[in-house]
Image: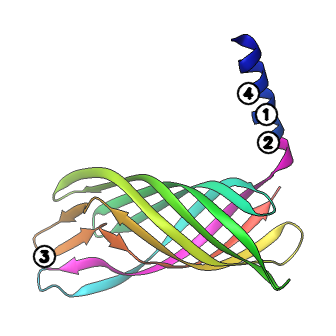
C-alpha cells in the first residue's frame, strides 16, 4: 500500500513542476442578473479571480467571483478545466467546463446556496511569455438562487457573461 502512495505522490508532484502556475483577473459582463417585480432586468459586471495551472493543450484552475448589489452578496466558486487548441499560430481557442458552489446572502431574504455548473469558450492570446489575454463567453447555471427585497430580485439561475481576462504565468 505504501508503494502505491509513494508512486501517486511522485506523479502528483511531477505534474506540479511540469505545468506553469498562473493567476488571472477576469472582468465579466452579464445580462439578466438583477430583475425587478415587473420582470425587467438589469445587466451587471463582476470580477473573477483565477488561480491554477496551464500546460500546452489544457489548463485547470479555481475561479472565484464575488457579486454585490443593493445589500445582497453572492459568491460563485468553480473548478474549471479548459482544453486549448492552436488557432493558425495566432492564438489558442479554448473550450471547457466547470463545476462549483454558489452562495447568496441578502439582508432582506436570508441566504441560499447550491451547486452550479458551466461551460467556457473563447480565445487566448499570449502577449509575452508570461502574460496572456483571454476573450470569451461563459454559461453558468446555479440552483435558481434568489434574494429579494420586495422590489428587486437578485438571481443566480442562468448567467451568460462575456469575459475578458489577463493571466500571469509564474
Question: In the figure, residue 92 lies in which quadrant?
Answer: bottom right
Task: Name the disc covering residue 11, or none.
Answer: 1
**Residue nearest the observer in this picture, 99 or 161:** 99
Residue identified by numbered label 2:
15
* Residue at 79% over, 42% down: 15
Q: How is the image coloured?
A: rainbow
First to last magenta residue range: 15-36
**Quadrant (top left/top right/bottom left/bottom right) for the C terminus:** bottom right
- Mark 1 and 2 residues: CB-CB less than 8 Å, in contact? yes
* Residue at 31% over, 51% down: 114
Question: In the figure, residue 107 lies in which quadrant?
Answer: bottom left
**Quadrant (top left/top right/bottom left/bottom right) for the N terminus:** top right
Q: CA distance from mark 2 to mark 3?
A: 51 Å
Would residue 66 be found to the left or right of residue 94 on screen?
A: left
Residue identified by numbered label 4:
8
Q: CA distance from mark 4 to mark 3?
A: 54 Å
101 up-or-down from 150: above or below: above
Mark sitting earlier along the chain (3/1) = 1
Mark 4: few, some, or many residues within 10 Å (few <14, many ≥20)?
few
- Mark 4 and 3 residues: CB-CB less than 8 Å, in contact? no
**Residue nearest the observer in this picture, 113 or 137:** 137
Amino acid at each position: 500500500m505504501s508503494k502505491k502512495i509513494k508512486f501517486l505522490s511522485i506523479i502528483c508532484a511531477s505534474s506540479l513542476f511540469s505545468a506553469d502556475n498562473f493567476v488571472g483577473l477576469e472582468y465579466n459582463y452579464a445580462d439578466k442578473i438583477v430583475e425587478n417585480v415587473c420582470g425587467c432586468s438589469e445587466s451587471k459586471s463582476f470580477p473573477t479571480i483565477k488561480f491554477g495551472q496551464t500546460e500546452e493543450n489544457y489548463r485547470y484552475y479555481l475561479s472565484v467571483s464575488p457579486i454585490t448589489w443593493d445589500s445582497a452578496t453572492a459568491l460563485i466558486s468553480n473548478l474549471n478545466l479548459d482544453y486549448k487548441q492552436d488557432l493558425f499560430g495566432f492564438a489558442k481557442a479554448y473550450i471547457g467546463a466547470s463545476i462549483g458552489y454558489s452562495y447568496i446572502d441578502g439582508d432582506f431574504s436570508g441566504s441560499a446556496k447550491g451547486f452550479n455548473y458551466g461551460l467556457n469558450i473563447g480565445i487566448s492570446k499570449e502577449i509575452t511569455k508570461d502574460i496572456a489575454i483571454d476573450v470569451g463567453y461563459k454559461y453558468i447555471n446555479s440552483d435558481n438562487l434568489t434574494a429579494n427585497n420586495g422590489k428587486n430580485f437578485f438571481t443566480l439561475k442562468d448567467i451568460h457573461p462575456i469575459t475578458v481576462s489577463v493571466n500571469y504565468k509564474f
